[in-house]
Image (cartoon, rainbow, N blue to C red):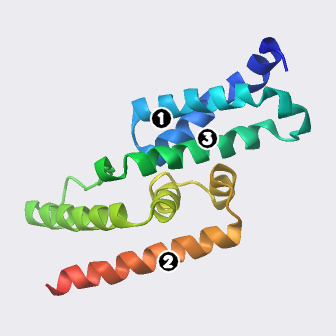
Amino acid sequence: MDAETFKRVFIPYHQKLYRIAYRIVQDAAGAEDIVQDTFIKLWNKRDEMENVDNTEAFAIVILRNTSLDHLRKTKNDRYTNYDTDMPETASLSKQIELQDEAEKVKYLINKLPDQQRQVMMMKHWDEYTDEEIEQATGLSAGNIRVILSRARKTIREQYIKIGQR
């Protein structure tokens, strides 16, 4: 594959790859670095591209693996930001209570294993469909359901423990 063909095939995926990387690592600069690393890896594998039927899926798999490697390297430094939507009409004490509960849930989500945290964020915060999660992660629909079920169960159990203290 020559440079022009490579650009024509893979550059259109840039925005989608960036969005997926950003959802995984929750860092704009990190996501851009991961996309660039993905393009480098794709370029290095350009001679193998004749055997690839779906170049987009191939790029997403490489991106996902690169993102997970990035998360493993920066595991201790990660903190995911979630916005809590609170109605303006709620009382101040209710807003504080909801914010406190949201902080507890954020903490529990950040303690989940990488894969559970990633799938949970994609499903509930980014509102991805199961099919989009399948494509982004390479997991089967059954695996996604099991991962979400386990993540929810873990969060529920840990949340109850926090509440009993």
Residues tagged 1 and 3 counted as in contact (Cβ below 8 A)? no
The answer to which image quadrant residue 42 occupies is top right
The residue at the far bottom in this view is 164
Q: CA distance from mark 1 to mark 3?
A: 10 Å
Q: Which residue does the image show at 69% across and 73% down from the upper left?
A: 142
Q: SS at mark 2?
A: helix
Q: Amino acid at mark 3?
A: Leu
Left or right for 93, reference 11:
left
Mark number for residue 40? none
Residue bearing the label numbered 2: 150
Q: Nearer the viewer, residue 89 or 12?
A: 12
Around disc 2, counting alpha carbons within 10 Å, would you say few (fewer than 14), some (14 to 19), or many (20 or more)?
Answer: some
Q: Sequence order check: which comes first, mark 2 or mark 3?
A: 3
Q: Sequence order check: which comes first, mark 1 or mark 2?
A: 1
Left or right for 25, reference 137:
left
The answer to which image quadrant residue 30 occupies is top left
Q: Sequence order check: which comes first, mark 1 or mark 3?
A: 1
Q: SS at mark 1?
A: helix
Q: Amino acid at mark 2?
A: Arg
Mark number for residue 31? 1
Left or right for 62, reference 100:
right
Callout in the foreground (2, 3): 3
Residue bearing the label numbered 3: 63
Q: Amino acid at mark 1?
A: Ala
Residues tagged 2 and 3 counted as in contact (Cβ below 8 A)? no
Q: Which residue does the image show at 84% across and 33% down from the upper left?
A: 48
Q: SS at mark 3?
A: helix
Q: Which residue does the image show at 52% across and 34% down from the upper left?
A: 34
